Image (spheres, rainbow, N blue to C red):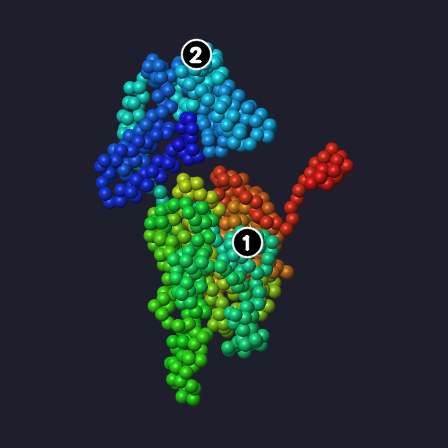
Amino acid sequence: GRECGGHIGPRSSFVLWDQAVATLLEQLGDGSGDGYHVLFAGGIHDARSAAAVSALAAPLVARGVKVGVLIGTAYLFTLEAVSAGAIVPGFQGEAIECATTTVIETSPGHAIRVAPTPAVDEFRARRRELEAAGLTPREVASELERLNLGRLRIASKGLTRGDGAELMALSDDEQHRRGLYMVGQVAAMRGEAVTIRELHCGIAAAATVLPADRSEPVALVDPKRTAIAVIGMSALLPGASDVEQYWENILNGVDSVTEVPTERWDPAVYFDPDSQRKGGDRTYSKWGGFLAPIIFDPLAYGIPPRSLRTIEPVHLLALEAVGQALADAGYAERPFNRERTAVVFGAGGGSSDLSNAFGFRGMMSHFVSQRPDLPPADELLERLGDVLPEWCEDTFPGVLINVIAGRVANRFNFGGANFTVDAACASSLAAVDAAVKELRLGHCDVAVVGGADTTQDIFSYLLFANSHVLSPRGRCRPFDEGADGIAISEGVAAVVLKRVEDAERDGDRIYAIIRGIAASSDGRALGLTAPNYEGQRRAVEQAYLRAEVSPQTVELVEAHGTGTAVGDRTEVEALASVYAAAGAATGQVAIGSVKSNIGHTKCAAGLASLVKTARALHDRVLPPTLQIERVNRKAGFGSNPFYPNTEARPWLHALANEPRRAAVSAFGFGGTNFHCVLEEYDRDYLPRPAALKTRSSELLVWQAADRATLRGELTAL
């Protein structure tokens, strides 16, 4: 491994050992390991390092493989190495005095780990000279190899070649000055000479004793207290084909709601602004959020192209969203335990275009048979043959929304639980709740959570229109005095979750931490679709009890915020009652809703909000909410803990000893309420990228002694 002495590669021994063990186990299959002998080398020098090998090699030993270790640098510290003449005393002295090691490179990929001695300084000075002289990389490498020739012999034997072929001895000072002491990083961890017997006993005996001596009883952890990390995200949402574009649209205040594309349904046929009053088979809204065309490669997911015509597009979009989320988490190709990966999708809400077309085909004979004055159903079907889908064996699973999670598990080879949950517009946050429980109970090690809704056909519009919840102006205006209803949208989003300690162990980038999530029902209320103050308040209270943090420490709430006057007011009142009781100050918490940007994505709405909020925590930005012309004073803004945030601002943190915290709400028809508490991850060792990867403008600064010099430098650019 890279920590060894002499010529080294790019990877550490632990990585190489782990890969070797996995490869050998795969090679053995169900067979025995008798006859196999494996030696582990690289950094093995004491009880602890030997114990690590013992633990790592345990699966091989269990299969009958003979396992041993190969010792390198540690032998330089043995008395016998000097007394037997293997090395001169000066080499051992350098090793004992070595507090660190360094790496020199003759050319890319040709690296040598050595002790930092005068020869290293000479090497680096010579390299700078050669590069300054304009030599090619190959010429530089050749000269440096020539410089190093014989330097290890000087260090280990104290000998060099004279003018002829004979070897001549060097003084101790010359050995120190000219020798290249190839030692591993182990040298920095040892400080005295020992016998070979003492070295071997320390490695061999302690390798079996140490693991038992150092083992401790496993402390039982309350599953409710296990923090969950968001390590990967994707967003196929109106105006955005990936999570970066989605986040940039939010920060730039992009309104992604448009008129309905005619290929979805024709406004000339179905749009009637007067239908808000009279209802029926027309809609008074022709606006919504729609996905742009997305390139989908069915072969990448093992799907025959001919099957696409019988698979609901939401299934395919779910595969694409999961693929993007895994890639964002760093697991596009990096191996992970797929057998212990669960999939939970929030989806439902009715049928989409394809299933409605099959439904029409299947039911037409039934209705036509009741009207003898109509042409026979077979004749009508023949006329409509080019616009209706054909039945086949793939139709049934292809149109079932509840098979989305199963299709994802099948195509990505996940072995954990897979299921789809439907909690109306709270579906995807309900999926997060279920996945968090799977992780906390140890039922899985990775959870892929999705939210999907593409029900943007005329059937959906007529349902919403006849319920009188659509905005006649076609925009969600959360917290605005002129809020008059919702604009419905489609979208698919996904996140990858792990327990925080597992994510830290695996070196994952963590966007945010889920501290707690809770759900409630409205109980017996005014109606199945009316917002309920008590039901929402219960979910909010329980979420903070489970998170074991105070609402007083939260500075951002991503509300359900659909843009209905009564719904928004009820939501803010329920939040305010909990936050104010906890001591939150007036105007302390920014409140917003991404529905002002993309409309209401229904079953995907909870995840659209969670992705936005996780990025806000990670990038430390308070994102804006659009469509607010006059703040709805009936919601109590100005006298409660909340203020609608209308522009992107740096998240300046005012609470000492507390990380940034945020919350997400999602509510659904039927009186189902979810509230999720998230927290900033502040132990990240990875560099954080800028909040925006692309910007409309950049600020660049040049400095010079005077204006004329500055002009000259700028002209030269």
Residue 579 in the image: state x and y as whole percent. Answer: 51, 51
**Residue at image point 42% right, 47% down:** 333
As drawn, the residue found furthest toward the bottom would be: 373
Q: Which amino acid does label 1 sit on?
A: Gln
Q: Which quarter of the rendering shows the C terminus?
A: top right
Q: Can residue 157 be seen from the camera position used here?
A: yes
Q: Does residue 484 sit above or below 118 in this rendering? A: below
Q: Residue 654 carries which label?
A: none
Dot 1: what SS? helix
**Residue at image point 46% right, 52% down:** 324
Q: Does residue 97 sit above or below 410 in this rendering? A: above
Residue 681 in the image: state x and y as whole percent. Answer: 48, 43
As drawn, the residue found furthest toward the right would be: 708
Q: Which quarter of the rendering shows the N terminus?
A: top left
Q: Which of 378 and 254 is in front in this view?
A: 378
Q: In which quarter of the image is residue 97?
A: top left
Q: Which amino acid does label 2 sit on?
A: Met
Q: Nearer the viewer, residue 291 or 592?
A: 291
Dot 2: what SS? strand
Q: Nearer the viewer, residue 275 or 366?
A: 366
Q: Does residue 361 sit above or below 32 in this rendering? A: below
Quick one: label 1, few (<14), some, or many (20+) residues within 10 Å?
some
What residue is pinned by disc 2? 168
Gap between marks 1 and 2 measured at Cα: 69 Å
Q: Can residue 515 be seen from the camera position used here?
A: no
What residue is pinned by disc 1? 245
Q: From the image, state whether disc 1 or disc 2 is nearer to you.
A: 2
Residue 674 in the image: state x and y as whole percent. Answer: 45, 57
**Residue at image point 36% right, 25% down:** 72
**Residue at image point 51% right, 78% down:** 280
Mark 1 or mark 2, earlier in chain: 2
